């Protein structure tokens, strides 16, 4: 049988090709310290795709639950704790009792979910032993077939984007169920993704590709999240939880409320290459976008169907294409003018600055600024990955080329990239709130480098509160709208940062990792697995069992820990006074 690439595979299927195929997608818990504020867009996109071909998808979202009890209080979890493994098992058992045995069960795949995927895989193998159990997304994209060894209950791993290859998985599972594995394999219908067999079970390694036209994909099937098997209102809970803002506890802050919000995505990948970032599950540097009309139609659908007041585009970088921004503004301006359609997204400060070096060593401003066009379209929030205000650290991160191209300006005794300053000023001037996220402890960072970032945060407070009466409620709200939290530099496998000499040395010393001398890739042994189990979303400082921190900066360990404690306590001025 000839191989058909996933991008062409849908063309070979009729609208009822997957009729009767049952697929359960399970979203893992993340960020227990934060409110669950984003419905699982990845599983919802896959579910929508499966439905187009007659499949029967369901979603179990383990992340939505936050239990308020003595255990949550003891651990200081303001919004409650996540489910225990036993509670998750009971929920999955009740769900499977209702929907029946599945052909495919897929696990969400953030790189920080290895612990949960390991336990849920055991649960699923016991509850539904005949289902094809698959892991996909970021975790699977990075570790690939290694994940089959770390989670032996898995039948398959799928790397990269899954919109089209999920259809092949579902068809393979149906073919095996209908014919038996031996007949299905001999027929060639399982090609080319059959990997090997273990303990009598076939295992598969699926390769995802980018859909040629993102506009043809269905929007997320959020209707499947209406309620869980017990009647808990999953979707309504998300809709009534702010995507961003101080109450979200996700390193965002806003100058406004978003009492009813929903999130989606309008692009895949990012054309840039910051050294600390891993986006393998969503296209890496292969940037692709949906059209302005397709985005606008989705916005209006959510407004009319769910009554949302704010829509979040979770793109890594929405602002790459000025043309698409202007097209979106032309469509949405009539709806945005009355304030009834507001949205936010992520971008870069150089895109907000819209400056270009000129021949005389200075810079010139764009004729039409992207932030002004976004404001015309109803945008009221942009999250900027500023990461550092230190020129030296930005260079180390791989962000120096575009952030430093317009030179340095001195403010309050500190040297800031002019691009960052102008980006913030332009964003505020357009009426959009700009939220910056920051990283401390990047490889090679010194205390003065870190203090420069803290000083930039203090300058943002000055900038946003100009003309306001100190001590007034309006002044307090303005100051509260500036994010003052800093992530800890975390070495995620698959990033360029992970292979930095200082990082490799620290991982060897603190966690006992070993690296291949030629490829510089870590040996996938038990020490490596234990390190991955410690990973989270960079909201905590990682330490080994002896309490030794992973410190990649040029600060001594004791100073690094002291500064981290000050930042966690919000004592920014004490950091500046060191």
Image (cartoon, rainbow, N blue to C red):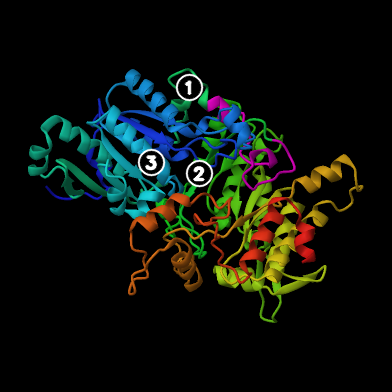
Q: Name the residue under label 1.
A: 227
**Disc number at residue 246?**
none
Taking the spot 86% from the left edge, 53% from the top edge, the residue there is: 466
Could you give the CA–CA distance between mark 1 and mark 3, rounded to whole angstroms?
23 Å
Q: Is 28 on the left or on the right of 340, as rendered?
A: left
Q: Does the magenta stretch include residue 230?
A: no
Q: Is mark 2 on a helix, strand or loop?
A: loop
Residue 21 pos. (x, y %): 26, 28
Residue 566 pos. (x, y %): 72, 56
Between 506 and 443, the residue placed more toward the observer is 506
Q: What stretch is highlighted in magenta?
A: 235-257
Taking the spot 74% from the left edge, 51% from the top edge, the residue there is: 570
Quarter holding residue 446: bottom right
1 in relation to 104, above or below: below
Q: Main secondary structure of the magenta part?
A: loop
Quarter holding residue 527: bottom left
Q: Which of marks 1 and 3 is in front?
A: 3
**How many numbered callouts?**
3
Could you give the CA–CA distance between mark 2 and mark 3, rounded to whole angstroms?
24 Å
């Amino acid at each position: 049988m000839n191989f058909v690439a996933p991008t062409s595979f849908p063309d070979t299927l009729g609208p009822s090709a997957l009729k009767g195929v049952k697929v359960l997608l399970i979203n893992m818990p993340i960020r227990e310290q934060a409110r669950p504020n984003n419905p699982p867009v990845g599983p919802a996109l896959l579910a929508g795709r499966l439905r187009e071909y007659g499949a029967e998808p369901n979603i179990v979202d383990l992340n939505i639950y936050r239990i308020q009890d003595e255990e949550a209080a003891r651990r200081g979890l303001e919004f409650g704790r996540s489910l225990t493994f036993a509670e998750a098992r009971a929920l999955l058992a009740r769900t499977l009792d209702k929907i029946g045995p599945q052909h495919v069960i897929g696990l969400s795949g953030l790189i920080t979910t290895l612990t949960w995927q390991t336990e849920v895989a055991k649960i699923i193998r016991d509850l539904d032993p005949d289902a094809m159990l698959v892991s996909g997304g970021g975790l699977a994209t990075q570790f690939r077939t290694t994940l089959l060894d770390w989670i032996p209950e898995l039948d398959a791993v799928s790397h990269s984007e899954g919109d089209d290859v999920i259809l092949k998985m579902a068809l393979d599972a149906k073919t095996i169920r209908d014919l038996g594995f031996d007949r299905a394999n001999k027929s060639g219908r399982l090609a080319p993704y059959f990997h090997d067999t273990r303990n009598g079970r076939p295992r598969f390694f699926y390769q995802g590709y980018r859909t040629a036209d993102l506009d043809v994909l269905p929007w997320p099937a959020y209707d499947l999240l209406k309620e869980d098997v017990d009647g808990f209102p999953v979707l309504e809970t998300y809709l009534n939880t702010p995507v961003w803002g101080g109450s979200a506890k996700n390193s965002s802050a806003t100058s406004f409320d978003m009492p009813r919000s929903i999130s989606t995505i309008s692009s895949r990948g990012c054309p840039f290459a910051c050294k600390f970032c891993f986006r393998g599950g969503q296209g890496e540097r292969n940037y692709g976008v949906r059209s302005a009309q397709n985005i606008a139609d989705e916005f209006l659908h959510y407004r009319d169907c769910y009554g949302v007041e704010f829509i979040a585009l979770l793109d890594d970088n929405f602002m790459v294409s000025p043309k698409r921004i202007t097209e979106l503004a032309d469509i949405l301006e009539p709806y945005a003018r009355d304030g009834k359609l507001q949205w936010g997204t992520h971008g870069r400060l150089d895109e907000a600055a819209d400056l270009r070096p000129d021949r005389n060593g200075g810079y010139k401003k764009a004729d039409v600024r992207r932030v002004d066009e976004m404001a015309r379209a109803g945008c009221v929030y942009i999250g900027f990955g500023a990461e550092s205000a230190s020129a030296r650290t930005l260079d180390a991160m791989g962000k120096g080329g575009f952030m430093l191209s317009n030179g340095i300006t001195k403010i309050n005794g500190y040297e800031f990239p002019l691009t960052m300053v102008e980006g913030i000023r332009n964003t505020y001037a357009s009426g959009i709130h700009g939220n910056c996220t920051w990283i401390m402890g990047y490889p090679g960072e010194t205390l003065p480098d870190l203090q420069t970032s803290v000083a930039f945060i203090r300058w943002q407070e000055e900038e946003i509160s100009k003309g306001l009466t100190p001590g007034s409620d309006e002044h307090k709200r303005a100051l509260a709208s500036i994010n003052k939290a800093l992530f800890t530099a975390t070495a995620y496998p698959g990033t360029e940062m992970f292979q930095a000499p200082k990082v490799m040395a620290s991982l060897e010393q603190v966690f006992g990792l070993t690296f291949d001398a030629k490829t510089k890739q870590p040996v996938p042994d038990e020490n490596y697995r234990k390190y991955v189990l410690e990973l989270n979303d960079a909201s905590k400082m990682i330490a080994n069992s002896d309490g030794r921190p992973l410190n990649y900066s040029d600060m001594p360990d004791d100073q690094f820990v002291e500064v981290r404690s000050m930042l966690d306590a919000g004592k920014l001025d004490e950091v500046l006074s060191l």
